[in-house]
Amino acid sequence: MTWLLDLDGVVWLAEQPIPGSAEAVARLRDEGERVVFLTNNSSARVGEYLDKLQRCGVPATEDDLITSAQAAATLVEPGETVLVCAGPGVEEALSARGAHPVREGRADAVVVGWHRDFDFDRLAAAFSAVHGGARLIATNDDATYPTDKGPVPGGGSILAAVSYASGATAVVAGKPHQPIADLLRQRVDDARIMVGDRPSTDGLLARRLGVPFGLVETGVKLQDDGPADFEPDVVAADLAALVAEQLGRPVG
């Protein structure tokens, strides 16, 4: 069976590993469970995520990772020109899809995702492409992004600017929306549980997939995530505690 784990707020906070998470993943693998990581953060390339996991003490391969950038790429066709208002992870996913990523000019679609160099010029380029007829796609619509110093504006905040300026409504690819659920089902057919820190994304994706939702309290505070109309199936202080509870004995 496969455990689905969010990254930000579950395995790490920004550049800081969350204590006990690496040991929890190792324990799951020792028990014969597969672990697949799901992230709404589309900014980094796959190799960068794998390197970061390794630094956190969690060896992983490309088959162990699904990103919202990959989900967004499923919404474009090979050969299409796609304006990227996002990080290099989106460019990588689009190129793997056979699309042609550009930073300005006319395009068939615009993909918006979280990136630190968003500015007026990036907003203007995205607006112009959408105003010229491009489809608007978002890797995610998360209002905030958790760090070890507290939340910062997320990909949804950047999307709000592009959407408001252009008047367009985006198709959102990441958690909890259908594109990433479809991609996940193509790669995982035996999910046991979805573990995350956001009921609004991880929790709703669990409901969409029909699996239990395990909430950990190491990422976004519930009051910062907005109201949820359901209760998590499991609540734990962190991933280590949740795994210990599910396996029936402490991790480590």
Image (spheres, rainbow, N blue to C red):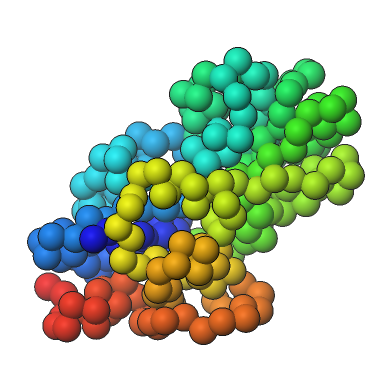
Of 155 and 38, nearer the camera is 38
Q: Check the picture and name the quadrant holding the N terminus.
A: bottom left
Residue 139 position in % (x across, y down) = 60, 44
| Relative to 241, residue 48 above or below | above
Q: Residue at x 30, y 46 (%)?
A: 64
Q: Quadrant of residue 142?
A: bottom right
| Relative to 101, residue 156 above or below | below
Q: Is residue 185 left or right of residue 244?
A: right
Of 112 and 123, nearer the camera is 112
Q: Residue at x 86, y 48 (%)?
A: 164
Q: Quadrant of residue 227?
A: bottom right
Q: Residue at x 66, y 54 (%)?
A: 141
Residue 157 position in % (x across, y down) = 72, 54
| Relative to 15, residue 112 above or below | above
Residue 92 position in % (x across, y down) = 49, 27
Q: How many marks?
A: 0
In this orientation, does residue 16 appear? no
Q: Is residue 10 left or right of residue 28?
A: right
In this orientation, does residue 201 appear? yes
Residue 180 position in % (x across, y down) = 51, 48
